Image (tube, rainbow, N blue to C red):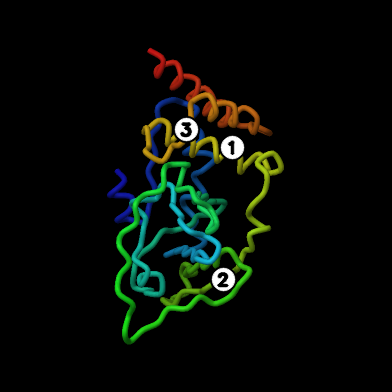
Amino acid sequence: METLADKGNGTYAYIDNLLEGKKVFSKELWGNLFVVAKDVKIQIEFNPAKVKEFRLIGYENRLLAREDFNDDRKDAGEMGSGHAVTAFYELVPADSDSSPSGSAPSKSAPASEPLTFQQVSLIPSESLLQFRLRYKLPGDGQEASNLIEASLTQDAIYKPLASIDDDFRFAAAVVEFGMVLRDSEWKGSSSWQSALALARSSKGQDPEGYRAEFIQLLELGELIQKQ
C-alpha cells in the first residue's frame, strides 16, 4: 500500500474500527483530495560551530541526497489542504562531551590528511540552523520550484520543556513511544513511564479523542511489556 501511494502521489490508511473510518473518510478526506503544494522538499543545515552532531528521527524512507534538493526533476511529497508535517531532530551542542541520547562518545575515525587544493572555513554566524523549503504550485504549468528560507538562532529553539506548548510536548511523547516500542539504540533514558507521563501532561484540548486513544495505546504497550 505504501509503495502504491508513493508511486501515485497518494495516501494510504489502516482502518481497524468505525471511528478510524470516520476520521479518514470524513475529517481527513478533503485534505487528501485537494493538493496545495507538490514536490515539497525540506532541507536543514546546522551551524557546525554550534552543533556537533545531529540525528533526524524517522523519515528514513523519505531522505533525499543533498544535490536532489535543487533538482526540480526529482519527485517529492505532496501537501494537502490542512496537512501539517512534524519532524524531530536530536542535537548535540558543539561544546558538549556527550553523544546522542546520552550514549558514550564513539571513537572517531583518524583524521584525514589536509586537502591540497581546497580549504574549508566556517562563516561566523549567530544562527543555529538554516531552513529551506522548496515546493511547486499544483496546476500552474510551471516546473520550476519556489524557495523559502529562514534562519533560527539558539535562543529561538532551546527552551525549557515546561514552557513549550502542548502540541510540541505531545509530539515528543509520540517520538519517545516510537523509540521505546522499537527498543531503539538511541532511546537513552526513555521509558514507557516517561512517555506516558509526558503524553498525559500535554493532552490539552482533545475534542476528537485522538490523544486519549494514543494514551490508551501507551498504557496497553506498557502492560504488554510487563508480561
- Of the residues shown, which amino acid type is indicated by label 2? Glu
Query: Helix, strand, or loop for circle 3?
Result: helix
- Image coordinates of residue 62 in percent, x first then y, are 37, 55
Q: Which residue is mark 1?
A: 170
Q: Quadrant of residue 172?
A: top right
Q: Quadrant of residue 186?
A: top left
Crowding at dot 2, Cα within 10 Å, few <14 / some 14-19 / many 20+, comes out as: few
**Quick check: 159 left or right of 193?**
right
User: In terms of depth relative to the viewer, which is nearer, 148 or 193?
Assistant: 193
- Image coordinates of residue 59 in percent, x first then y, are 39, 50
In the rendered image, the quadrant that contains the N terminus is top left
- Residue 151 vs 105, above or below: the answer is below
Compute the Cα span from label 3 to label 2: 32 Å
- Image coordinates of residue 97 in percent, x first then y, are 50, 51
Q: Which residue is mark 2?
A: 149
Q: Which numbered marker is on residue 177?
A: 3
> Which callout, 2 or 1, points at the residue further toward the start of the chain?
2
Compute the Cα span from label 3 to label 1: 11 Å
- Of the residues shown, which amino acid type is indicated by label 3? Phe
- Image coordinates of residue 192 in percent, x first then y, are 49, 25
User: In terms of depth relative to the viewer, which is nearer, 105 or 87?
Assistant: 105
Q: Nearer the viewer, mark 3 or mark 2?
A: 3
- Of the residues shown, which amino acid type is indicated by label 1? Phe
Residue at figure coordinates x 41%, y 43% from the top left? 104
Compute the Cα span from label 2 to label 1: 27 Å
In the rendered image, the quadrant that contains the C terminus is top left
Residues under numbered marks 3 and 2 in contact, where contact means CB atoms less than 8 Å apart: no
Crowding at dot 3, Cα within 10 Å, few <14 / some 14-19 / many 20+, comes out as: many
Residue at figure coordinates x 44%, y 37% from the top left? 187
> Which callout, 3 or 1, points at the residue further toward the start of the chain?
1
